[in-house]
Image (tube, rainbow, N blue to C red):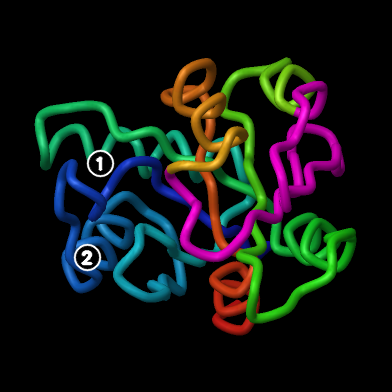
Amino acid sequence: MRVALLLRGVNVGGVTVRSAELRALLAEAGLGEVATVLASGNAVVTATDAAAAAGAAEAALERRYGRRIQVLGIAIESLAAIVADYPHGEDDEHTPYVVFELEPGVAAELAALEPGPGEAIAAGAAGVVHWSNPRGTTLTSPFAKALERTAKDRVTTRNVRTLRKVLAAA
């Protein structure tokens, strides 16, 4: 099956993982048909199990970089359903995100938060929250601040537009 691998905290002030190096690491870890998407810690691989693929990727990354880099593995079909279910409108004034929990229960906590002005949040499929925020407020909106305060290392967030590129690479 095709599996999306979403790396948390790379190329955004943490560890820099170049696409070519990520492709090589994932192939060496035994994952097949590796494709990377953008320079933002996204890959698509062939594997028999999404969780096992994420585990193999985490182990390979830790060996290479000397620290744990969390990886979420999700079947492409599941990712496609999450993107298709994005409930908020998309326009030039807002940025569409999906927040994926890396620790059970975090998405439910986040979905219960009160959105700030111009923001919208909604629980999605198990383990995700759909979030729309006014353009330019990704780090400063009330939900963004709550996300940083309560769930920083327990989630990974992707722009819906990036997720569509991940799906296209599958």
For the C terminus, which image quadrant? bottom right
Q: Which mark is residue 24?
A: 2
The quadrant in which residue 95 appears is: bottom right
Q: CA distance from mark 2 to mark 1?
A: 10 Å
Q: State the SS at label 1.
A: helix
As drawn, the label of residue 60 is 1
- Image position, residue 141 (x, y; %): 55, 42
Q: In percent of the image, x 68 and y 62: which residue is there?
A: 1
Q: Residue 157: give x, y in percent of width and height.
A: 53, 47
User: Amino acid under label 1?
Assistant: Ala
- When the figure is inspected, residue 141 is found, relative to residue 149, above or below; the finding is below
Q: Quadrant of residue 57?
A: top left
Q: Name the element at disc 2.
A: helix
> Which callout, 2 or 1, points at the residue further toward the start of the chain?
2
Quick check: 149 above or below 40? above
The residue depicted at 79 percent of the width and 29 percent of the height is 111
